[in-house]
Amino acid sequence: MRKLLAVMLTALLCVTGCSSKDSAADPLSAWNDAPAKKSITEFVERVTTADTSDFVAPQDRIAVFDNDGTLWAEAPLPFQAAFVIDELRRRAPQEPALAADPMVQAALKGDVAALLAGDRHEGLLRVLALTHAGMTTEEFNQRVTDWMATARHPRFGEPYDQLTYEPQQQLLNYLRDKGFRTFIVSGGGADFMRVFSQRVYGIPPEQVVGSTGTTKYELRDGKPVLVKSMDYVFVDDKAGKPSGIHEFVGHRPILAVGNSDGDQAMLEYTTIDNPRPSLGVLIHHTDADREYAYDANPPSSGKLVTALQAAEPNSWTVVDMKNDWKTVFAQ
């Protein structure tokens, strides 16, 4: 019996030990061994291998990631939009003037198309102004924190911050292990993402670039506060993304990852005529069973047409979610 137990224990240790070694040996274990994974790892190895022509010094290893649809899901609507709609549902019954606003009514009906219409998404900006303006930054942070703790995704039934992509989480860690600094550059609200970026992605708030409104300094009860305002809004989407990178990062990236036409300018800025080696990556949502499948006709945001057409001539890597990812959501 003792001999049998010893054999079984040895076999168990071998299995668990081999599994750990495999995981350690492959930092992108949630990715299938396919061309997309190979293009990423080969690029990273090229730019981090010293004494070669493609070597990029650590201070210039900047990787930028879109958030919605790139690091976490964005369907059936962007998660910040879900937060705003829940805020409206909470406040509208007690605030008749708020409930009477046409854009608020559109939001409460789930008419995301009305909110996102136009290059600057004027309807969404209107709703953001109505719900966010006048809050202190601390009050806003607390509202987002409370919502994250209680809200659930309508399809998956999970907290929204549990719907990040495991392959992308691994990619972030892999890049940081290779001396990259990782930034979020997203059309979403910077203040919204900064609440959870460190905890969820390991990205500190100062490395989050997003759409922003102005803040106003005040003394309230003798204490300094910043009050959110929508007097001026910077929209960090489409052509705004390269501007945001220039203003808030100060370095041209060598790696950009996105999933929609809204990210095309960011990938162009990263890869076209860059004096350093560079790579653009597009996440193509093709997995209706494990997540969603869309490109030209997304559920709300995330349209992917022109960027997909630009991928081949610009040598961008297109990640087919169904075929390139072993797993989708982080466990």
Image: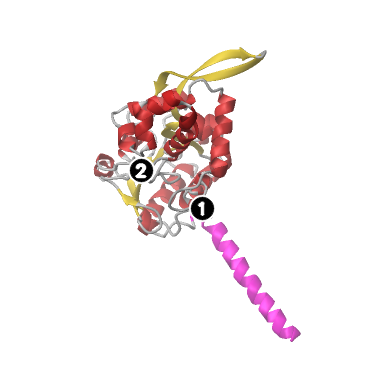
What residue sits right under mark 1 in the picture?
A: 330
- Relative to 78, residue 170 above or below: below
How far across and down, in percent of the image, does residue 31 sit?
44, 56
Note whether residue 271 is visible: no
Give me the C-alpha separation between circle 1 and circle 2.
Answer: 18 Å
How far across and down, in percent of the image, does residue 18 sit?
59, 67
* Secondary element at image label 1: loop
- Relative to 212, residue 303 above or below: below
Q: Main secondary structure of the magenta part?
A: helix
Q: Is 302 inside the magenta-drawn segment?
A: no
How far across and down, in percent of the image, does residue 77 sit?
38, 42
Residue at 33% across / 37% down in the picture?
A: 111
Magenta region, residue range: 1-28
What residue sits right under mark 2 in the picture?
A: 259
Task: Please state which amino acid type lies under the numbered disc 1.
Answer: Ala
**Left of 213 or right of it: where is 271?**
left
Image label count: 2
Mark 1, other Cα within 10 Å: few <14 / some 14–19 / many ≥20: some
178, 238: nearer the viewer: 238
Note whether residue 44 is visible: yes
Task: Please state which amino acid type lies under the numbered disc 2.
Answer: Asn
**Left of 194 or right of it: where is 231?**
left
Q: Quadrant of residue 231?
A: top left
Quadrant containing the N terminus is: bottom right
Which residue in the rendered view is the most extreme toward the bottom? 1
Q: Is 16 inside the magenta-drawn segment?
A: yes
Q: Are dots 1 and 2 in contact, CB under 8 Å?
A: no
- Dot 1 or dot 2, earlier in sequence: 2
Residue at 38% across / 50% down in the picture?
A: 39
How far across and down, in percent of the image, does residue 130 sit?
44, 24
